[in-house]
Image: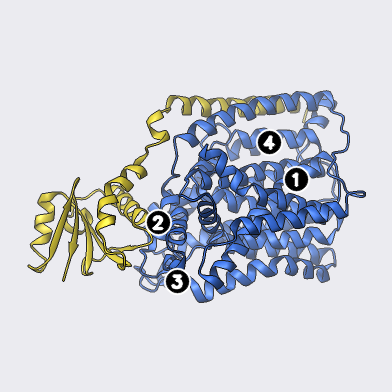
Chain colours: A yellow, B blue
Amino acid sequence: MNPLIKKLALILFILVSVYSSVSYLIHNVQAWNPRLITNDGVYDWDARLADLRADLPPDVNVVGYVSDWDVTPDYNYPDNETEYVLTQYTMAPVIVTRDSGLEWVIVNLSLKDFETWAATQPADIKVTKFPLGLFLVHKP
Amino acid sequence: MNYVLGFLVYLPAVLAGGLLVHGLWHGTQPSRLLFKFGLGAGLGLGLTSLITFLILLFTNRLIGFMVVQLILLLCGHALTWRNWKSNPIIPERFTWTRTQKILLGVFAVTLLITLSAYVIYAVMTPTGRFDAWMIYNRTARFIYRDPAHWQNTLSPELYWLFHADYPLLVPVNVAGAWNTLGSEIMRAPQAQSAYFLIGIFCVLMGAIAQLRTTGQSLLAGITLLAVPVFYYTAAREEADITVAFFILATFALLYLYNNEQKPALIALAGLTAGLAAWTKNEGLLFLLSGSAAWLVMLHRQNQLKELKWYALGLALPLAVIIYFKLFLAPPNDLFDPAGSTNLFQRFTDFEKYTIIAGNFYSQIFSFGNGKISILLIAVYGLFIGLEKSNNRKQSVIAAMIAVFLQLAGYFLVYVLTPHDINWHLRTSLYRLMVHIFPSALFIFFVSVTDPETIIANA
């Protein structure tokens, strides 16, 4: 290969590299959102579950979890998956399983869907309602 | 402030590793010191994780994280002090050529640009991203919040998505850092990832400068700075940067051993391969492929007896991993008998092979999420050609075999997965490429013509 072409290839390669870095910086600058510095979705989820977590007896190691994907065929999988992962992340070291048959169950549903689900459960369940569609169910 | 605390809480381990590597492998050329600092950062963090885990295992208490780091630092200091006359930490004088000065300038500017981009993204990602919540920081929370029952994090009752069987290098260090700092400071895991990212740069550039030229080393650095996926993966507190670090370090040590034949380099490679396996399950695969590379090279050099040094370095991490996998970790979801189809059916689903091959192929054009692609790097290599020297042939063959085995292993995992193949590829393939890319870049830049030669001949 001609040495001048090699030199040109080197210069072009370096220029593309620098351009790539600049593009990445511009992309991140455009995406700048100062609210996220202290408050991303995880903080919101931790706050949403804080009261429920406090209400759960300290000796409970495993709780069940019910969400849209358990009651309706028309659910958004990524959203359900993310909410489940965040619930487990917040509740640690309590294990959150996708099992509605446990003594304690976290139900993450709208009021209407919760009522549909609750109708399939034993009549003596005790329900504690929290804001934003969150229920803690105890089966005696 | 939390950022500063996050970096400070791991600093003794980082410095200790650097000093220990310096004590084991002498030399004060600036490039060698850079390599040793980078390698030491990862090794210090890896050793700290192993020892803290052993304390946790035997006491069911999360104690000694900082003490372990300080003891390692003391050992590093003692070793350095003992060898100070023959091996001080004072860089030898170095003269820059005009080409190198230009490349240094470009590197500095690119570094500033990418660093700014990283910082912007990192500050907007205060708790990491999906994998951090699902695996690493979740595990760290189990350990930190209830150390007496820390093994609950390995419970088979955890949904498969949480990968309870993953090794614990990253979570143990995160839990240890939180325990030392007194709260769940989310910038600590981000700082740990940043140390491994810095380590990748130091190892890549330091080793290439040792093996080739300073200009080539700077060009490799500029190229890596142009691949955004590394910076957002690090900011997201995922462990893929950590695996990439240990894989790269193992390859770099293989090349350096080929040059210098120092047993310490083999022992360090055993340690880095073992720590890759202590980071993620993909690291377990690398333990096999990386060890195969060393086996091939030592066999071709009629030095198989030197494998004892590799075994020495590997002994501690391997013992911990074997115990962890045999007696503590739940079964892996990929091999769960409750999977949707049995292994034979998965093996013979040939449509899957086409989908996987298509996705691997697309990475040639799209990996990195920037303007520098694998294709562009390959085209650049075609234009400038290979270096004439033949003295690295054995390392190149060994490393290429390992990279091929690693990629083949990843391919096989996709064939065997019981999960939806499109979902699995979409959510993980780019991260598997992150593991391999710095090593491939290293092999590439060690093999092709350097900028000094190109400019001198033009």
- SS for tag 1? helix
Residue type of the residue flagged with mark 3 = Pro
Label 4: few (<14), some (14–19) or many (≥20) C-alpha neighbours in 10 Å: many
Q: Camera-side residue: B367 or B159?
A: B159
Q: Earlier in the sequence, mark 4 or mark 3?
A: 4
Chain of the residue displaying label 3 = B
Question: Disc 2 or disc 4, which is closer to the eye?
Answer: 4
Residue linked to disc 4: B221
Q: CA distance from mark 4 to mark 3?
A: 40 Å
Label 3: few (<14), some (14–19) or many (≥20) C-alpha neighbours in 10 Å: some
Q: CA distance from mark 2 to mark 3?
A: 20 Å
Q: CA distance from mark 1 to mark 2?
A: 39 Å
Q: Earlier in the sequence, mark 4 or mark 1?
A: 1
Q: Earlier in the sequence, mark 2 or mark 3?
A: 3
Which disc is residue A69 wearing? none
Which disc is residue B331 wearing? 3
Chain of the residue displaying label 2 = B
Residue extending farthest to the front is B182
Q: CA distance from mark 2 to mark 4?
A: 34 Å
Dividing the picture into quarters, in which one does residue B52 lie?
bottom right
Q: CA distance from mark 4 to mark 1?
A: 13 Å
Q: Camera-side residue: A52 or B352?
A: A52
Residue type of the residue flagged with mark 4 = Gly
